[in-house]
Image (tube, rainbow, N blue to C red):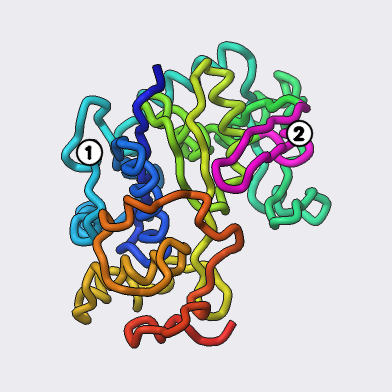
Amino acid sequence: MAKAVCGRFAPTPSGRMHLGNVFCALLAWLSAKKQGGTITLRIEDLDKPRCPAGSDMLLEDDLHWLGLEWDTGGSAGGKDAPYYQSRRFDIYAAYFAQLQKLGLTYPCFCNRAELHAAQAPHLSDGRILYAGTCRHLTAEQTAAKARTKDPAQRLRLPDTAVSFIDGHYGPYTQNLAAECGDIILRRSDGVYAYQLAVVVDDALMGITQVVRGRDILTSTPRQLALLRLWGFEPPAYAHIPLLLDGQGERLAKRHQSLGVRELRRQGVAAAEIVGVLARLAGLRPDMRPLAAADLLADFRLERLPRQDVCLRDLPCVPDWLRPLCLPC
């Protein structure tokens, strides 16, 4: 018997939602609901200084206004509470300890300057491939360095290829040693890394489907490696194109002039935003205002474009969207 579908939306509450966030949340919501599934709202606030007090409630308010209701999680809680990563450190510590007991972790004393050194291998997407500088430190060397600096903790990743079938982009393979390198599991300040937290949370919260931006596609093999180490069943992954402004840059927090809060203040209706995003996603032939639920009947992931979506591609740009639609 097939498992019930459980999707998730997992934002970092570092500011109000922008259209890029809404685009991803809408598609994740549609994908789960189309299959009769549920949505979990998880607040990824690992880095508390980046998350202003109350920003989680503003985010929830925007989701309610857009009609993207969730079934469990957020401030309302649920059976897998807490749904705030900042409150789950004891859980992460227990799973980190399992890897440590197996001898799969090691302390890393490299600072940012060393990681960005000219000799450090750089990947095609700009990421730095960790050279394994601290992987083979002796016990004496480790003890000496630890007297003056708190280390981060890395995972020893094997020299092996990890493959999976992405729900939108198809087969994807990555060699962990050549294209990833040993990843950080816990920072030197004691904060657990995104890669560890998201894998543990997805598994313990029963997430069966992850729909997220294609910028996270390269992270999926290392997350699959972690899932296997802990014996968890992986969710199905589907990565979606990014939403770009008129200059071809990814929408981000810097676009707060066209964040949901500002659009609401201007009197733009939620249905107008959903209609424009549905057109950009290839789900509708026009930009007619409509509710998210109105898209369910004809929704299919394969209808989404494979390339990133630029706002300038709209046949007719609404006045409220024009500030983001300068020519690419």
Above or below for 160 versus 98: below
Looking at the picture, which amino acid does disc 2 mark?
Ala
Q: Determine which residue is flagged by label 2.
A: 177
Q: CA distance from mark 2 to mark 1?
A: 39 Å
Q: Which mark is residue 131?
A: none
Is 32 colored magenta in this rendering? no
- Which residue is at 22% across, 53% downward? 60
- Which residue is at 58% across, 29% downward? 224
What span is colored magenta in the figure? 159-182
Above or below for 282 versus 6: below
- Name the quadrant of the C terminus: bottom right
SS at circle 1? loop
Q: Where does residue 155 sit, x and y in percent of width and height?
A: 63, 28
- Which residue is at 80% across, 56% downward? 118
Looking at the picture, which amino acid does disc 1 mark?
Asp
Mark 2, other Cα within 10 Å: few <14 / some 14–19 / many ≥20: some
